[in-house]
Structure formats: structure tokens, C-alpha cells
Image (tube, helix red, strand yellow):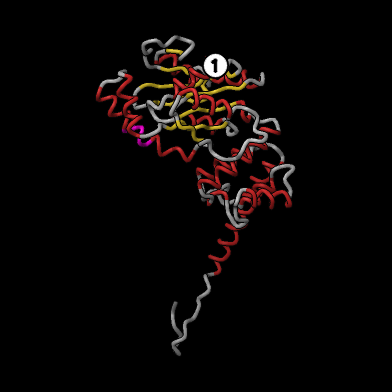
Amino acid sequence: MPESSSGRQVAIAPPEVDRVAASRAAVAARRARAEVKGAVADGTRSPLDVLRVAMEEPEGVEGRLRVTEFLGSIPAIGRTKTERIMDELAISPSKRLGGLGRLQRRRLRQYTAEWVAAHGGTGDRLVVLAGPTAVGKGTVAAHIRANHPDIRLSVSATTRAPRPGEVEGQHYYFVDDEAFDRMIAEGELLEWATVHNSHRYGTPRGPVEAAIARGEGVLLEIDIQGARSVRRAMPEATLVFLLPPSWDELVRRLVGRGTETPAEQQRRLETAKVELAAVDEFDHEVVNREVGDAAQKVVDLMRPRRGRPRRPVP
């Protein structure tokens, strides 16, 4: 700060053009936030989608919304209820969506997901199970298929070759690259991704949407990239991250199944380190120590939310 001839510091006001620009920017920001709140209030935008964008872009319009503004825009949640919710979720009234910590994000999303489920969203009817390579997603999903016939498992399409024991139409739809390209072009996939820099996997959209429309529970067992895509397409989906008991156990399982070459095993382990860091993006964590126990915890998350604690599954 410059000094006057007497040695005193003198504040210099910003040029008029700067003040005008700042004022216009502030007005535009308030208008943009008001549009987001209005879209939630009139039902043209899911509050879960607003939360998703806020977490992806903390400094964007959604991320700059105060949590109180966000909750207040949801139909049937007034000022009194907002204050109670903020206290229950241990979130300060000054917090913005983009500035929430890990646990606060989870608490707020789970509360919001309950509201969506109670007002016609897919809620618990769509659960995504994902996790690092070799964690046992397929084994857990197979256990659910065998023991919980009321839950429909989505069958993915893939360009990789079948592994020993895999059945067409039960484990995967095995297609070539040309057929997969056609499915993408015609919008037949809810999500798709290239996994481990090699083969492509995708979830056919039609069967999932039809099952949800019938009121059935649907479980998607997919990779982490796919889980992110599903959240963008259906933000009310519940995302469950399957964890190994330890890193050493993950390595043992990958090497022990003997379906990859040593070079492929090393590549998948490097990928797994990155995949494990994505756990904070998910709503719940389930540790796969024993298949039956892990499967039951996933199934429990597909039951009605009423009375269920708002915290990750241990």
C-alpha cells in the first residue's frame, strides 16, 4: 500500500471500470445460482445432479451454492427443516457445496438421495458395484444372482474374449469392435469405457431402464469409469465401492486367478493403485473379506432406505 508525504498509508480505490465489472460479475453469479435453485424447485433438475456437478467443479455455479440455499430449493424443505438438517449432518451454515469435506459430502448426498427416492426417483432400485481389479466384483455379483432372485443383475457388453466358464448372456454379451461401435452410435449404452487400455465394456441401456420401470432392483457390476458415467446419466444411483481386505490380498487374488500374463498382472496392479484412490467418490464402502458377507451388505443397501443409518457400511 503506498504512503502519503506524511508517511501514512493511503488506500487506493479500484478504477471505476473494475468496480462496474465486479458488480456485473456478482449479479451474473447470483442470477446463475438462482437459475439452478429454480430448476431444482420446479423439478426440472434433480438435486442429486446439482450435487454431482458441485463436487466435480467446486468453483462453478453449483459449487458456489451455500448448502442452506441448496436445501432450501428442494420442495418440502423449508427454513426450519433446513436448520435441522444442517445440524443433523454437522454442516456449518456458511459452507458451500464445493467446500464440503469427504464425510459431509456423503452425509448430504445420502440425505438428498433419500429425498429423491421418496419422490419418485430410482433410489435404491439402481445400485452400482465397482472397485479395483481382482477385488472380487464378479464373484460377489454371482453370489447375489444365485441367492437373491429378486435382484436383477445387469449384463454388460464387452469386446474381450470369454474367460473359462463365462456364459454368453449370463456373464457378458461378447461382441466385436464393429458391433460395439454400432451400440455407441445408436445410443444403446448407458455407459461404456475402455478398461486397462485394452478392451471396451458397456451397459446396455434398455434392460436397465425397463427393469427400473417395473420397480425391480437392478445391480450394475462395472468398472470405476463406468460408475462415474452412470452417476452422470442417473445421479440418483447408489454407488458402492468394493474394497479388498488389504493390498497384499488384492495381489494374491490377481495372481492366483491365473487369467493374465505377468505383464498384464503388473499393468492391472498399477491401475488398481489409481482405482483405490476413487473410493471417496462413492456413497458406501464394502470390504470383501468373505463373499457371502460382502454380498449381503450390498443387498442390504438395495432395501428401502427408511430407518437405515446414513453412514458407510463398515
Q: Residue at x 50, y 31 (%)?
A: 229
Where does label 1 land, which residue?
Answer: 147
Q: Residue 81: x, y in percent? A: 72, 48
Q: Residue at x 70, y 33 (%)?
A: 118
Q: Residue 230: x, y in percent? A: 53, 29
Q: Residue 108: x, y in percent? A: 60, 44
As drawn, the residue found furthest toward the left would be: 262
What is the magenta segment's predominant secondary structure?
helix
Q: Which residues are magenta?
A: 270-274
Q: Residue at x 54, y 28 (%)?
A: 297
Q: Residue 204: x, y in percent? A: 52, 19
Q: Indicate whether 186 appears above or below 247.
A: above
User: Does residue 173 appear anywhere in the picture?
Assistant: yes
Instruction: Tell me the quarter of the picture where residue 107 sits.
Output: top right
Instruction: Tell me the quarter of the picture where residue 139 sits.
Output: top left
Q: Which element type, helix, strand or loop, lies under badge 1?
A: helix
Q: Nearer the viewer, residue 100 or 306?
A: 306
Instruction: Tell me the quarter of the picture where residue 49 sits.
Output: top right
**Screen quadrant of the N terminus:** bottom left
User: Does residue 228 appear anywhere in the picture?
Assistant: no
